[in-house]
Image (spheres, coloured by chain):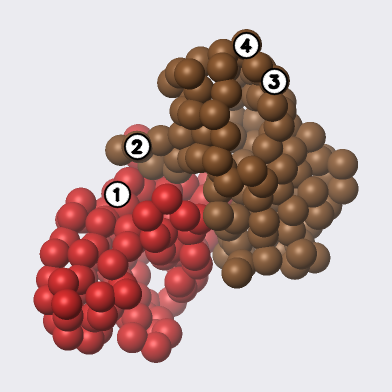
Chain colours: A red, B brown
């Protein structure tokens, strides 16, 4: 089974609007992380939320975690054209030793100016 | 800049060639990773090194051979690749692998590999 499935696969919004992306996973986790990737580039870490946390903020980013539903959401407020990128959630499963991340397929966000 | 560099950025090779990808991290991290990113597929973890010791080999074909001479450098040696090996190869590092804590990974820009 695949961890970290993002929803939607693609999202197109206007500048200034909020963007919400969701992630579901299947096993117990130590933490969940969100990453951003500009086209053909490496991933950039955005935010990490631990399994005992429910919400975390960083600038215009807000991440929630619901371990009972095995889901997380990433909210980007007041979006900008520069936010256009792919966004991935990644889970660090509790059942495995060591820190391994399992990534989802990502949400492609397009912010139109 | 994330503190992780990769060379080359682009590589085109024939199926009979031998080439190597290089990764270097300037962050003082103890763990380094190789990932493969193919179109329409999630990132696939290939190898993990912790303090120069390989701790993960995710059923990767032997035509991919990793090397970690020290905790700052990681190589991926390639030989007799197949066209389906064409992908973006990403290197990453994190503070540690075995701590049981939660650490983010820092990624390099990737090497775009095309096998002809």
Q: Are marks 1 and 4 on the same chain?
A: no
**In this orientation, which residue lies closer to the viewer: B79 or A5?**
B79
Residue that appears at 48% across and 58% down: A43
Q: Report whether B52 appears left or right of A98.
A: right
Q: Position of residue B3 (x, y in %)?
A: 68, 66
Q: Nearer the viewer, residue A76 or A97?
A: A76
1 vs 4, front mark: 4
Quarter placement of the C terminus of chain A: bottom left
Pointer 4: what residue?
B16
Instruction: Please name whichever residue, B101 or B61, is drawn nearer the observer in this view of the structure.
Output: B61
Disc 4, SS: loop
In terms of sequence position, does the residue under pointer 2 or pointer 3 come before the other?
A: 3
- Badge 4: chain ID: B
Q: Find residue A93 and report its horizontal and vertical position in percent.
A: 50, 51
Tell me: A7 left or right of B72: left
Q: Which mark is residue A96?
A: none
- What is the chain identity of the residue bearing mark 2? B
Q: CA distance from mark 1 to mark 3?
A: 36 Å
Q: Earlier in the sequence, mark 4 or mark 2?
A: 4
Q: Residue at x 49, y 65 (%)?
A: A44
Q: Determine which residue is flagged by label 2.
A: B39
Q: Quadrant of the N terminus of chain A?
A: top left
Please tell me whether mark 1 sits on a helix, a strand or a loop.
strand
Q: Which mark is residue A5?
A: 1
């Amino acid at each position: 089974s695949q961890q970290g499935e993002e929803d939607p696969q693609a999202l197109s919004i206007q500048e200034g609007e909020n963007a919400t992306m969701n992630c579901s996973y299947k096993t117990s986790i130590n933490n969940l992380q969100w990453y951003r990737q500009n086209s053909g580039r490496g991933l950039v870490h955005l935010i990490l939320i631990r399994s005992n946390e429910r919400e975390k903020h960083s600038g215009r980013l807000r991440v929630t975690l619901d371990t009972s539903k095995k889901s997380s959401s990433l909210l980007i407020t007041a979006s900008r054209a520069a936010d256009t990128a792919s966004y991935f959630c990644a889970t660090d499963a509790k059942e495995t030793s060591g820190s391994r991340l399992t990534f989802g397929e990502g949400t492609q966000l397009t912010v139109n100016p | 800049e994330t503190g992780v560099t990769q060379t080359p950025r682009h590589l085109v090779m024939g199926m009979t060639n031998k080439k190597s990808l290089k990764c270097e991290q300037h962050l003082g991290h103890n763990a380094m990773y190789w990932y493969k990113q193919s179109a329409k597929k999630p990132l696939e973890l290939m190898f993990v090194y912790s303090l120069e010791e390989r701790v993960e080999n995710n059923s990767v074909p032997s035509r991919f051979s990793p090397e970690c001479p020290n905790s700052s450098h990681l190589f991926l040696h390639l030989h007799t690749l197949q066209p389906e090996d064409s992908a973006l190869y990403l290197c990453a590092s994190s503070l540690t692998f075995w701590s049981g804590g939660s650490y983010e990974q820092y990624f390099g820009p990737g090497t775009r590999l095309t096998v002809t």
